[in-house]
């Protein structure tokens, strides 16, 4: 009885053609191994994601203001929580910081001026209320500095009239404009700005640099959402992404990125009031192939099987391929015998 003949490897796969084109484009790759290669598995559910997050930050500060009272109405409304005052909000994505100032006149009240104690006048700071100051002409000796005769400025009294208060010892209170009463209110300052972060995820070993530069990314998810302090980031995205087919975005990694680059920047007087997210998806085809007579030096558990990842077409219609375990990625000019992995030769 005749013995069975093993079937010839399928070397006509379009995926192997992609790998052959890629290998032939590399100076330091030897193509001979692919002559007997055979595709064993194709995974079309591999993907990479570029995730852009924008958060609109609202920073609020309260300061007390005052001016001379002029008979204004003083409602004396109690100051509320700063975020309970609604003055609208800008777009989530801001190129520059925006600032708005609001005088909360409904909180205004009047009070006695602390500088003049309600009198509208206070002691002169130059003469301390005495109306006279030490004579600087004779340096309080009573005599001229050049001759031993009576000083013509103080006439021997050692003091002169204070020029600031004109000898009265009192000056008008500039703080209350001689009214003795001040009007006070609270001023709310709001500053809006945007925080932006970009993260990359993939269920393949495709490097971030490759994902970032890949031209074939497609819009996968885009939304803008008002945000509150009680919203849970991970739960919100869990419900959002659950509706998308074949989604492999890792919620825990996305939440970690949000906590590190957005939430940790929050201080007591800040709140996140808006969230925008754009996710772009890069479809990747993971191809497993085997080559008799070769061993995977990157992963010995793979035996004679290898991987490559096809993630689109470049600007010059060349196939975009990533691999890191092809058996002969060294100088092809030196032949098969010198095939090895070398930092100076390996082309990633």
Image (cartoon, rainbow, N blue to C red):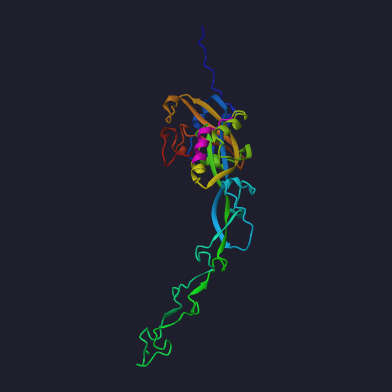
In the rendered image, the vertical position of residue 298 relative to residue 318, given as above or below: above
What residue is shown at x 59% (from left), y 36% (from top)?
Answer: 281
Camera-nearest residue between 160 and 329: 160
- The spot of residue 35 in percent (x, y) is 52, 28
Q: Quadrant of residue 127?
A: bottom left
Camera-nearest residue between 88 and 149: 149
In the rendered image, the vertical position of residue 258 relative to residue 132, given as above or below: above
Q: Is residue 75 left or right of residue 137?
A: right
What residue is shown at x 46% (from left), y 79% (from top)?
Answer: 162
Query: For the magenta stretch, what is the residue range?
Result: 247-259
Furthest residue to the top?
Answer: 1
**Count of number-bearing discs:** 0
- The spot of residue 84 in percent (x, y) is 60, 45
**Residue 125 shown in magenta:** no
Camera-nearest residue between 256 and 119: 119
Residue 23 visible somewhere in the drawing: no
Q: Is residue 340 left or right of residue 92?
A: left
Residue 172 visible somewhere in the drawing: yes
- The spot of residue 218 in percent (x, y) is 63, 37
In the rendered image, the vertical position of residue 80 relative to residue 305, given as above or below: below
- The spot of residue 229 in percent (x, y) is 55, 39
**Residue 253 shown in magenta:** yes
What residue is shown at x 54% (from left), y 44% (from top)?
Answer: 197
Camera-nearest residue between 258 and 185: 185
In the rendered image, the vertical position of residue 276 relative to residue 181, given as above or below: above
Q: Quadrant of residue 51?
A: top right
Q: What main secondary structure does the magenta stretch of the protein show? A: helix
């Amino acid at each position: 009885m005749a013995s069975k003949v093993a079937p010839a490897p399928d070397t006509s796969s379009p995926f192997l053609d992609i790998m052959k084109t890629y290998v032939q484009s590399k100076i330091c790759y030897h193509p001979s191994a692919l002559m007997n290669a055979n595709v064993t598995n194709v995974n079309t559910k591999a993907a990479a994601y570029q995730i852009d997050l924008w958060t609109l930050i609202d920073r609020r500060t309260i300061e007390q203001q005052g001016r001379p009272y002029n008979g204004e109405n003083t409602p004396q409304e109690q100051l509320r929580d700063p975020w309970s005052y609604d003055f609208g909000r800008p777009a989530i994505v801001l190129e520059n910081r925006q600032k708005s100032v609001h005088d909360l006149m409904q909180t205004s009240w009047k009070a006695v001026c602390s500088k003049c104690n309600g009198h509208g006048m206070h002691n002169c700071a130059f003469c301390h209320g005495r109306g006279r100051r030490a004579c600087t002409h004779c340096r309080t000796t009573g005599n001229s500095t050049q001759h031993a005769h009576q000083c013509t400025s103080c006439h021997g009294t050692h003091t002169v009239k204070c020029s600031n208060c004109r000898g009265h010892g009192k000056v008008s209170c500039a703080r209350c404009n001689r009214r003795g009463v001040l009007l006070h209110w609270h001023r709310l300052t709001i500053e809006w700005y945007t925080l932006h972060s970009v993260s990359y995820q993939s269920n393949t070993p495709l490097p971030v640099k490759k994902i970032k530069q890949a031209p074939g990314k497609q819009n996968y998810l885009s939304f803008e959402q008002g945000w509150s302090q009680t919203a849970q980031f991970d739960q919100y995205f869990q419900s959002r992404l659950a509706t998308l087919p074949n989604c492999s975005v890792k919620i825990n990694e996305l939440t970690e990125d949000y906590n590190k680059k957005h939430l940790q920047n929050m201080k007591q007087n800040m709140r996140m009031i808006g969230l925008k997210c754009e996710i772009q998806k890069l479809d990747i085809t993971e191809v497993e192939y085997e080559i008799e007579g070769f061993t995977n030096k990157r992963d010995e558990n793979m035996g004679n099987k290898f991987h490559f990842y096809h993630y689109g077409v470049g600007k010059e219609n060349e196939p975009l391929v990533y691999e890191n375990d092809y058996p002969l990625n060294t100088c092809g000019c030196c032949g098969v015998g010198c095939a090895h992995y070398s930092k100076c030769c390996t082309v990633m």
